[in-house]
Image (cartoon, grey):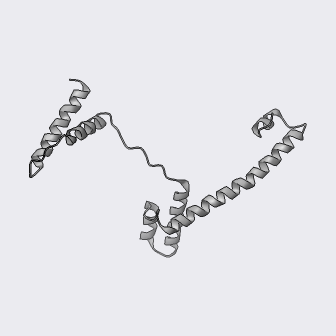
């Protein structure tokens, strides 16, 4: 028996067990396909990928948790760390401020990089590696 045949057999068995548990004897095609896919995922040891959380959201959670702990609300700190307030107005304001600060910092850094590029081009002592790193020839 191939893996695909085994998946189908398991899917059909799961479907039959499901139909027996339905009070009205409901049958349909979709549950078989779902069961077959579930069997395949189990056979392949599939696991869901780890969720990727924006670092700014993680910073908001810690900021909110610290604020709750300062007020003695430990349950609120736990809720913050679990992400229960991620779609609140406070979160939106925090994220907007964090992104605005990052953009301002990048603008300031851009000016320093431009200045460093000018110095590196005119400095005869600068090594070629520094020039390449700064975008020069």
Q: Nearer the viewer, residue 127 or 87?
A: 87
Q: Quadrant of the C terminus?
A: top right
Q: Is residue 12 left or right of residue 51?
A: left
Which image quadrant for residue 46?
top left
Q: Residue at x 9, y 46 (%)?
A: 20
Measuring from the top left, give residue 102's x and y in whole percent.
65, 57
Measuring from the top left, give residue 86's x and y in whole percent.
47, 62
Q: Quadrant of the N terminus?
A: top left
Residue 2 vs 43, above or below: the answer is above
Which image quadrant for residue 32?
top left
Which image quadrant for residue 19?
top left
Q: Is residue 107 left or right of residue 98?
A: right
Residue 86 vs 126, above or below: the answer is below
Q: Nearer the viewer, residue 25 or 15?
A: 25
Q: Is residue 37 left or right of residue 93?
A: left
Q: Nearer the viewer, residue 66 or 98?
A: 98
Give the number of marks: 0
Q: Residue at x 70, y 56 (%)?
A: 105
Q: Is residue 11 left or right of residue 122?
A: left
Q: Residue furthest top?
A: 1
Q: Residue at x 17, y 40 (%)?
A: 14
Residue 111 vs 64, above or below: the answer is above
Measuring from the top left, give residue 101's x and y in whole percent.
65, 60
Q: Residue furthest bottom?
A: 71
Measuring from the top left, give residue 127's x and y in whole percent.
83, 35
């Amino acid at each position: 028996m191939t893996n695909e045949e085994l998946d189908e057999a398991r899917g059909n068995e799961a479907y039959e067990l499901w139909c027996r548990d339905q009070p009205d004897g409901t049958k349909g095609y979709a549950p078989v396909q779902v069961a077959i896919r579930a069997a395949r995922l189990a056979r392949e040891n599939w696991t869901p990928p780890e969720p990727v959380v924006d670092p700014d959201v993680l910073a908001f959670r810690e900021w909110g948790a610290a604020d709750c702990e300062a007020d003695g609300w430990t349950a609120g700190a736990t809720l913050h760390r679990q992400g229960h307030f991620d779609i609140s107005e406070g979160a939106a304001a925090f994220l907007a401020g964090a992104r605005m600060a990052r953009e301002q910092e990048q603008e300031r850094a851009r000016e320093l990089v431009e200045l460093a590029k000018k110095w590196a081009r005119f400095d005869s002592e600068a090594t070629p590696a520094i020039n390449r790193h700064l975008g020069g020839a």
